[in-house]
Structure formats: structure tokens, C-alpha cells
Image (spheres, grey):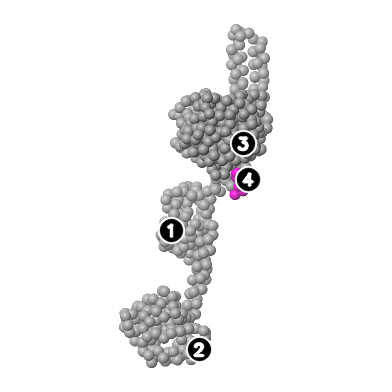
Amino acid sequence: MNNKTRIMVVEDEFIVSMEIQDRLKSLGYSIAYAAASGEDAIDKVPETQPDLVLMDIMLKGEIDGVVAAERIKSRFEIPVIYLTAHSDEATLTRAKISQPFGYLIKPFDERGLHTTIEMALYRHDMEIKLKQSEQWLSAVLNSIGDAVIATDSEGNIKFINPNAEVLTGWKQHEALDKQLDQVLNIKNKEDEKLLNKPIKTGFKKGDSPNLVLNSTLVTRFGNEVPIDSSTSPIRDEKGEINGAVIVFRDITEKVKLERQLTQAQKMESIGLMAGGAAHDFNNILAAILGYASFMKVKLLQDDPNFKYVETIERSAQRGAELTSQLLTFTRGGKQDIKPVNLNEIVNETVKIIKSTFDKAIEIETRLFEDLPSVKADEVQMQQMLMNLCVNARDAMTQGGKLIVETDLTLIHDHDTSFFMGAKAGSYVTISVADTGIGMDKDTLEKIFDPFFTTKEKGKGTGLGLSMVYGVVKNHGGFEKVTSELGKGTTFKIYFPAGEKVKKSQKTVNKKPVHGNELILVVDDEEPIREFVKDVLESYNYRVLLAENGEEAVTIFEKNKDKINLVILDMVMPKMGGLQTFIKLKMLNPKIKAFLSSGYSPDGQAGEILERGVNGFLQKPYEMNDLLFKVRDILDMAPEASHSVETHSVET
């Protein structure tokens, strides 16, 4: 007996109510409240907080005991025991539907009262614990990383967690009580056939139901997702299977990495074979090419055999080029490793292809100016880039756009799983993107294979991309290729970043030239302003100084037709470089300016460059760097030069 149990008595007969209360007290229970109507009982539950309600079925008032009990149970989850002496069949039927925790037939004795109350309290306590257990289990299943679906023995879905909702495309309220194969459409990877009622089939065989490993899930929207799955039976206390739990997960990234590993292993095997063939072939070519050149020296050009020997020599040279590409692919070629500036290689390569490619192909470069060096063989880097550009050209038979871009990328530990052989760190990237015909999935998997080509016979050897693959691996890099039929292809190559590229020495032997233009120097650091002023004035330039953006705008507004060039700092008080340049450009749309900053040209600096700033000079810089940059910008467009000798200057 629990002497802390508080009971509400709902009885419209006063004498009967008092008698019940006396009996309850004699049994050690306390009276939470005595109500004479259903309405009164409902109103007093929040205030009195009973543990159990004894409810007379036949009550006076607008609602009877059945309605009052249903409302108390649904709103407050308090167990109700019905009291009844006599009632019509319809009322009793309604009482059964409301699922009370017990019945007491009037008149009743204390033993019956005590037993019924304790059984009701016990049942209610068990229901609470069961509900808490279900909630805990549901929370666990909802929070795990895998997708989970539970079914009954007929394969009807009884539970689906959020991850399963995401993968299948079905919400829980839509999926409940549906057959499993209506929601979880699984395709056998081997024969591409959908599994037909796998849960029910397993039960009929008397076995634990199971699904196919490494299969494909067809979502509600028709998308196909590779999955790993496992199924466990749900058994009752007798060991009988009465349901199943299906756990599955998206393995798209796993499949991708497995393909990368398979591709790498395949390329390694092909490389070993190709390397041996190239070695032997080179020995043969050495003799052919050697004797051809020897014979050519001994023959006169009007000799009938001279042209035959020359043809042999050219053919041997072509064969030597092919074996050289094979050796590069197999990492057997010679390398001259040193710090290389990929931007310079891009610029040199683009100059060549612009003069040779069809004019219907628009060529654009996007170079990260403050690019670190790469330890590489410069010749191989240029060959790699040229091959990628030629492939891009061949994919754009009707013209298109070719974009060559360099960048600096940081790869974190959690990103390395997406790239075969990658380690965390900084990488210099070079990408070649075209708007050509693109490739399908099968072609994409073979592009680096030696001698594989989609070009017509005689149009390609199939070694270009193999050489690219070899160069990338030779230099500890890795590649990412994306392509879509009709939308083009992008090759992105990653190389470990080295030190910042040293300033080019090409201008060292040049002598800076004098000028007479008017230059506005905007910098909040006085020593820098004075340094620039002294250097420029020593070469006959005239200089105006501003220590912030606001002052620069004021000076420029007074001299906008006289100032030939603005040297602009990035970070300044009152008004930064971006806002300053925008205002200066509004005053004179033809303004010439270059950015000089200690920050690399990304973020805001990159935005200024996109808005029309003519260049960037990284701090710190030497005198000649400044003079050459000034002269280069001033000479960019001769018509933009202004004569300032006859103008007065306002500061």
C-alpha cells in the first residue's frame, strides 16, 4: 500500500462520496479532491494533481463520467477507475472504448477497492516506463549516423529514422504501415533488378531476412545511391521472428575512393608494362635514329636516297617523342627540379596557343598573383599544360571558351579522404576548363590510360593525358577531373606549395626610364609615402601625397584632369582602398591605378582588381619594382597619358 497516493473521487451522490472517501482513508490513501460533476473534476485536476481518479460513470451535468475520464486521460495522463451500479449497454460500450484502468461495481468492499486501485497504479507505472523506454530507443535510433527502418513480420514499416527519411525521400508519417519495398527500393548491383519483398521472402523461408550488400537504393525521386545494408530479426520472448530492423548507409564517397584506388593500381600496372616497352623501344630507336643521322651526313642532298633517310630520321624522332611521353607517364623520364612559377608557365603557354588556336575559341587566364612556387621540372610543367589545352581545344570543334586558372588551396585533414594520396597542407592548383562536348562516366574512367583516345584515327596517340598523369604523380600531386556531356570538362591539378616565388630577375638588367607624369600616392604610412615620393621624384615624376582615402578623394577632385596615375594602399583609416577607388573612378572613369598592399590580391583586394585597378604590387618591394610597375601601367594605353607641364596642381 502506498500511503502517498492521492486520489480524486468523482461522485454526484454526497453520502456515497463520503463513504468512498472514508474507505480510502482507512486504506491509507489521501483524498486529493472530491468532485460532484465531470466538469468540476476536469477543472480541479491541474490544481490538486491526483495520482488516480475514481469516476462514477453516471453523473449529473452536461458530461457523464466517460467523457470526463477521456478528457482527464488525454490531457493529464492520469489513470481512471470507473464506478458503476447500473448503466445502459451503449454507455458501457463507450466506457470500454475509453480503456479505463479498472471497474468497481457498486456496492464494493474494501478488499476489492484496494486491489483494483493497486492494479491500476501498477499498470499505469508500467505504461509510463514502457513509454519512456520507447522514447529513449527512438531517440537513440534517431540520433545514430546510419539510416534505420523497422518492420513487422509482414514487412510493414513501423519505424523510420531521420537519416532513412533523407536517403529514401519518404517522411515518417508517409512511410508508416507501408510495405518495405514501397519505401526501400533496393537494386541488385549484379543484375540491376529490384529486390522483390526481401523481408517477407526471408520469413517464408524461415530464415533471418537479409538484403544484398553493396547494392543500390532507388530513392522516391528516382535517384540512385550506392548503399551498404544489414538486416537483423526482431524476436519475441519465444524466439519467434516478428519483425526486422534494416540498417543502411550511403557509401557514395567510399565507392569513389575505391574507384580511385582501383584506377591508381591499374595505372601503376600499366606504367610498369609501358616503362618496359618504352625502354626496349628506345634501344631500337637509338640504332635507327643514330644510323639515319650518320647516313644523312654522308649523302648529298641531290642523292636519290637522301629523302628516304630523312623520312627514316623524322619517323624515328617522332617515335622518340612518343617514348619520352611514355617514360614521363611511368615516372622514368629525367627531371630538372627547381622552384617554378606556374603563373609564368601559364603566360608563356597562353602566348603560344593564342597564336595557333582557332580564333573561335576565347582564351581567358585567371592567375593568383601572390602564388607560391612549386618544386617541379619546368619543361614537364609546360608539356602538361600544353597537353591539357590541346585536349580542351579538340573538345571545342565549334568554338567555345578555354579558362586557365591558378590558385592557392588549403586542404584540411578531413578533406584528404576525398583525394587519393592527398595530405593536409597548402597546394598550388592549376585548372584548365573548356565548354566542349564533355565526357560520359565510362570515358572519364579511361582518360589516363596509355593509347586510349576518343579522337579519329591519326588524330591522336592517346598518350597526352597519360603524360599529364605521369607529370602529376612525378611531382607528388593529384588531380580532379569533372565533366558532363554537352557542358564541358575541367582538369584541376594540385601540387604541394613551396615558398613564395621570388621576384623575377628579368628586369634587373633593364634601366628604369624617367617620366614627367603626375602621380597621386595614397598610403597611411608616412615612411612609405616619403619613400615612394623620393624614388619617383628622382626620376622626374611629380608626386601628390594623401594619408587616407578621404584626403585622396579631395585632392583628386581638384586635379582629376591632371593626375595620370594613382598608387593606392588597401587598408587605411577613414576610407579603405576599395571605397576610395570607387569614388575616384566616379570622378574619372578612365583613371589609371594600381594597388600596393601587404595583403595578397584576394578578398577585397581581388574585388578592386575586378573593378578595374590596373595591377598589383606586393609590399615590400624594391625601387626598381616600383619604377617598372609605374612605367608599365602608364604605358598601358598611350591615349590615356596626360601632359601636366602646363597645369598647376592643387593640394
Can you identify the residue that label 4 sits on? Answer: 424
- Pointer 2 residue: 28
What mark, if any, has residue 324 been given in the picture? none
Residue 210 shown left or right of residue 72 in the figure: right
Q: Amino acid at mark 3?
A: Arg
Please name which of the two marks, 1 or 3, marks the residue nearer to the observer: 3
The span from disc 1 to disc 4 (Cα, nearest Å) is 39 Å
* Image point (46%, 57%), residue name: 165
Residue density around tag 3, few if under 14, some if 14–19, many if 20 or more, within 10 Å: some
Discs 3, 2 touching: Cβ within 8 Å: no
Spatial separation of the CA atoms under disc 3 and disc 4: 41 Å
Q: Residue at x 62, y 26 (%)?
A: 539
Identify the magenta region. 410-414
Kindly identify which residue carries mark 1.
Answer: 171
Q: Nearer the viewer, mark 3 or mark 4?
A: 3
Can residue 157 be seen? Answer: yes
How many angstroms separate mark 3 from mark 2 (CA)?
95 Å
- What residue does disc 3 label? 529
Q: Which of label 3 and label 2 is nearer to you?
A: 3
Judge whether residue 412 is colored magenta.
yes
Q: Earlier in the sequence, mark 1 or mark 4?
A: 1
Residue 130 placed where, x, y %?
50, 72
